Image (tube, helix red, strand yellow):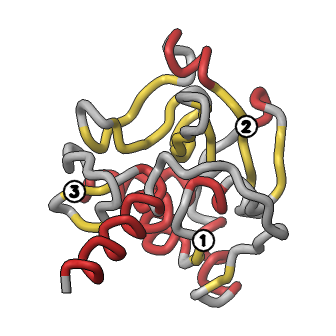
Amino acid sequence: MKLLLLVLTVLLLLSGCSSKKISQPAYKAKKTTSKTTISKKKHSGNWINVALSKEYSKWDGVPYRYGGTSRKGVDCSSLMQILYRDAFGLKIPRTTAHQAKVGYQIKKNSSREGDLVFFKTGYNTRHSGIIIEKDKFIHSSTKYGVMISSLNNPYWKSKYWQTRRLLP
């Protein structure tokens, strides 16, 4: 029983935001809603921002928890997975390492609402967020929990790694 608990603990620790970069084939997001649902939303103004704002209001202030997947505590990659599922009906991978391979990479100055943004926060650690405005992103901060930060903040600016687009 102790061995099983140890194995489960190790697996949980390996699945969070601090995942190491690994080589894997590109992963395409799986749609869980129909194209007609998405196209209807496009015609109602900035549907991406509206959908993200609605989901953010549910998660604002939820504490960070490494490996967490609920409102009791959530890590950055799990938050991205949940936001993409609930706001856009898209299924994306669980870990930051795998999320950094979905969609296609774009230039930082071309980012828009709904794009995933990634940071190298340590030698082998990565952090993810989702753009909600031109220079702002939603993420789960280890210190403050789920919040919105600026890409122009000196810390995030120095840690910026890449931006990826999944939405049309």
Task: Report the side of 112 relative to 103 (left or right).
Answer: left
Label 1 secondary element: loop
**Which amino acid type is marked by label 1?**
Ile
Q: Which quadrant of the view contains residue 26?
A: bottom right
| Image position, residue 74 (x, y; %) | 30, 56
| Image position, residue 41 (x, y; %) | 58, 70
- Identified at 72% across, 57% down, the residue is 22
Instruction: Find disc 3 in the rendering and name its residue.
Output: 73
Q: Which quadrant of the view contains residue 135?
A: top right
- Identified at 30% across, 36% down, the residue is 142
Q: CA distance from mark 3 to mark 1?
A: 19 Å
**Which amino acid type is marked by label 3?**
Gly
Mark with earlier residue (3, 1): 3
Instruction: Find disc 1 in the rendering and name its residue.
Output: 92
Give the answer, above or below, for where 143 lies relative to 32.
above
Label 3 secondary element: strand
**Which amino acid type is marked by label 2?**
Gln
Decide which of 88, 43 is in the foreground and name it.
Answer: 88
Q: Quadrant of the N terminus?
A: bottom left
Q: Quadrant of the C terminus?
A: bottom right
Disc 2 residue crowd, few under 14, some 14–19, many 20+, Cα 10 Å: some
Task: Report the side of 137 relative to 4 (left or right).
Answer: right
| Image position, residue 99 (x, y; %) | 64, 59
Instruction: Find disc 2 in the rendering and name its residue.
Output: 162
Disc 1 residue crowd, few under 14, some 14–19, many 20+, Cα 10 Å: many
